[in-house]
Amino acid sequence: MRYVVILKNMEKLTIVKVGGKIVEESNSLKQLLSDFSKIKGNKVLVHGGGRSATALAAKLGIKSEMVNGRRITDTEMLKVVIMVYGGLVNKQIVAGLQAIGVNALGLTGADMNYMRSEKRPVTDVDYGFVGDVKEVNASLLADLIDKGVVPVLAPLTHDKAGNLLNTNADTIASEAAKALSKHFEVTLMYCFEKKGVLMNETDDESVILDLTPALFEKYVSTGVIQGGMIPKLENSFEALKAGVTRVMITRADLIHADYGTKISL
Amino acid sequence: MRYVVILKNMEKLTIVKVGGKIVEESNSLKQLLSDFSKIKGNKVLVHGGGRSATALAAKLGIKSEMVNGRRITDTEMLKVVIMVYGGLVNKQIVAGLQAIGVNALGLTGADMNYMRSEKRPVTDVDYGFVGDVKEVNASLLADLIDKGVVPVLAPLTHDKAGNLLNTNADTIASEAAKALSKHFEVTLMYCFEKKGVLMNETDDESVILDLTPALFEKYVSTGVIQGGMIPKLENSFEALKAGVTRVMITRADLIHADYGTKISL
C-alpha cells in the first residue's frame, strides 16, 4: 500500500492576551485596539478585567480577596465578574473594535459551549466559583474565524450544569491557542506591563530574549523568575507542546515590533 | 425569455421575546428555559432585564428614570445596562440553556455587528444612550442558526462608532425577525405576563384571539388597547409586512399551547 502525505497549508492566527489595566483605561484601550486591528489576518483577543471587578465590588460593598494572585469568587463576586468581564469590559472592547472595522464577537466559555470547566476542588484554599478548563470545542470558533470574525474572549467559562466560572485569562488564552492549533498555525502573545521576562526586575531593559524549559528551571531555582510569571511560562511551554507554533511574552505596544521574550522548547 | 420560479423550502425559526421579570427570578427562568428548549428546530431568545438594571443602579446610588415606559440612559446608567443586559442576564441564560443541551450564544448588536443603531435624537425628551435600529446584518447569524446555534439576544445595539446603545427588547425581537425572515419562515412570539391582548384589562380571560390593523385602530380609539401594548402591536404589524410569517402575543408558559393573540394583516 502506498501512502500520500497531504500537507495542509494552515492559515496563521494570532492570539493576543492583554491584562486588565490596559483595557480598563480609555486611552490605553484605544491604542491597544488600534494596534490589535493592524495584525494581519486571523486574530483573537483575550482580556482580563480584575481592576474593574475590584472597583465595582467595592462600590457594592463586596470585599475582594486574593490568594496567590487569584480572586476568591463567592456568589456575590461571581455576579460582579460576570457583569464586568462578560458585560462591561468585553462588550466595550467589541464595540470599540467594530468602530475600527474589526468584526469582533464577544464570548464567554458558555457561548457555543466553547470552553467547559469544572469548579476547582477545595484544598487548603477554597477559591469558590473558579473553573479549571476541561474541554475546548473550537470547531464553531474556527468556522467563524475563517469567515473573518474576531473572537474577544472574556475570562469566564462554564460547567455545562448552568454555572459560569471565573477563569484566569492566561489560561483561557493558552487553552484557546492549543485547541485552535488544530485549525491554524497559532502565535500566542501574552502582553503585560514589561517588555518581556526580565533578568532583573528593577531593570526594564533586561529582557530575556529566548527562554527554554532548561533556562526556565534554572531561573526559577535561582529566583530570577517568580510569582505570577511561573504559571504564565508553564502555560506557554504546555501550549508549544500541544501544537502552538510560537509563544511570545511582551508589552502590548510591542506586538508589531517582534520584540520580547520568545518561548521555545 | 422564459422564467423559472424557484420555490425555496425555508426552514422554520421561532423567535421568543420574554420580558425582564421572567428571566430575573430563578424559578420562572428555569421553567422558561425548559419550555423554550422544547421548541422544535431553529430558535432565538430575546430578553429584557429592566428590573435587575434598576436594582443594580439603586445599589450603586444611580437613580432610574423612566419616560413613556422607556429608561433614560445616561453614561452611568449605560454602564449598568451593559453589565446587566449584556453580562449578568444574558450569560446566565446562555449557561442555563447549555445545561439543558441548547447550544446558546449570547449577543449584543455589537457582536458580529449584527444590529446597528443610531442614538435617538433629542426632542422633548433626551433618552440619552438609547439606540434606534438602522441596520441588521443577519447572514452570519443565519449561518450559525443553520449549524444549530441558538442566539440569545440582549437589548443592546451599537452605533459602529464605539458606543453601545440601550435598545428596547421588543424592537430587537421584531428587527431580528424581519431580517431573519429572508433566511427562515419566522414565527415571532412576544411573551408577557398576560395570556394575550385583553379586551378588559381586569379580566385575564378576555383575550382577543385575532387582531388585525382595522381592529387595532378601533381598539386604540376606544381605549381598549393603550400604553406599552401600542408600540408592541405596531412592531408586530410591521414585522408581518416585512415578511415575518406569524406573530403571537401570549404568556411564556403558553408557548406550546398555540393560545394567545394572533396578529394578522
Image (cartoon, coloured by chain):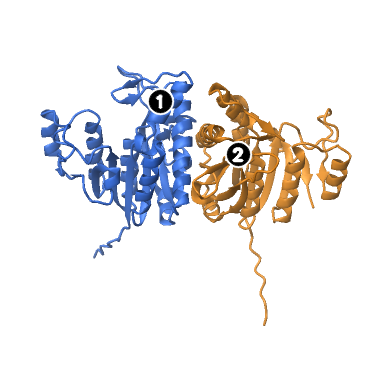
Chain colours: A blue, B orange
Say which of B155 and A182 sits in front.
B155
Tell me: residue B92, above or below residue A44. above
Residue under the point 45% across and 39% down: A90
The reply to whether discs 1 and 2 touch (Cβ–Cβ < 8 Å) is: no
Q: Chain of mark 1?
A: A
Q: Residue furthest bottom?
A: B1
Select label 1 or label 2 by which is in front.
2
Instruction: Give left or right: position of A186 versus B51.
Output: left
Q: Quadrant of residue B206?
A: top right
Instruction: Give left or right: position of B243 versus A200.
Output: right
Q: Could you say whether the residue bearing mark 1 is in a helix, strand or loop? A: helix
Residue under the point 28% across and 51% down: A256
Pointer 1 residue: A54
In percent of width and height, residue B254 lies at: 71, 35
Q: For the residue carrying disc 2, how many other residues have a C-alpha within 10 Å: few (<14), some (14-19), or many (20+)?
A: some
Q: What distance separates the C-alpha of mark 1 from that of mark 2?
A: 27 Å
Say which of A205 and B194 sits in front.
A205
Identify the amino acid type marked 2.
Gly
Q: Could you say whether the residue bearing mark 2 is in a helix, strand or loop? A: loop
For the N terminus of chain A, give its image quadrant: bottom left
Pointer 2 residue: B128
Residue A1 visible in the displayed image? no
In percent of width and height, residue A33 lies at: 39, 47
In percent of width and height, residue A86 lies at: 46, 36
Q: Chain of mark 2?
A: B
